[in-house]
Image (cartoon, rainbow, N blue to C red):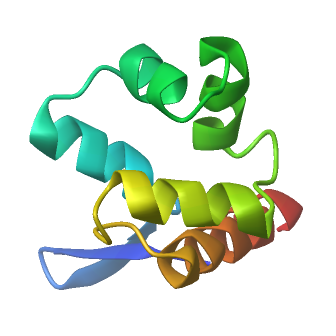
Amino acid sequence: MFLTAMCLMGKLSVMAPTPPINPLRKFLEAKDIPAGAFAEQCGLSPSYFSRLLSGDREADSSLLAVFEAETNGAVTPNEWVRWWIATTEDSAA
């Protein structure tokens, strides 16, 4: 779980957990690529792709390979899996 700590007037305050950032979402935002356009480029419906980005659906290894290829290696399967694990751990806590 990711926690953010803040010190105010000598007192330590723990704030709400900071959700992990989806590496593919970060890539799309940095490159100013619309999610719907990227979804279609990958052969996915925009609604299914949206569920993948939000963590509502899990991507299989073949889809992770597509993401890696379509981002020219900027988003690796390992990055996605680390994000997915962190996301599911946060929701289970």
Residue 54 quadrant: top right
Q: Residue at x 23, y 28 (%)?
A: 33
Q: Nearer the viewer, residue 75 or 26?
A: 75
Left or right, residue 74 beside residue 2: left
Q: Residue at x 72, y 75 (%)?
A: 85
Q: Nearer the viewer, residue 3 or 76?
A: 76
Question: On the rendered image, what quadrant is the N terminus found in?
Answer: bottom right
Left or right, residue 38 beside residue 53: left
Question: On the rendered image, what quadrant is the C terminus found in?
Answer: bottom right
Left or right, residue 86 beside residue 80: right
In percent of width and height, residue 92 lies at 87, 64
Q: Residue at x 79, y 57 (%)?
A: 91
In percent of width and height, residue 17 lies at 52, 63
Residue 12 quadrant: bottom left
Q: In this view of the protein, can residue 19 be seen by the observer?
A: no
Q: Residue at x 13, y 40 (%)?
A: 31
Q: Establish if 41 lies above or below 23.
A: above
Left or right, residue 71 beside residue 87: left
Q: In this view of the protein, can residue 90 be seen by the observer?
A: yes
In percent of width and height, residue 51 lies at 71, 30
Q: Nearer the viewer, residue 5 or 37?
A: 37
The image shows a total of numbered marks equal to: 0
Q: Establish if 56 lies above or below 88.
A: above
Furthest toward the right, the residue is 92
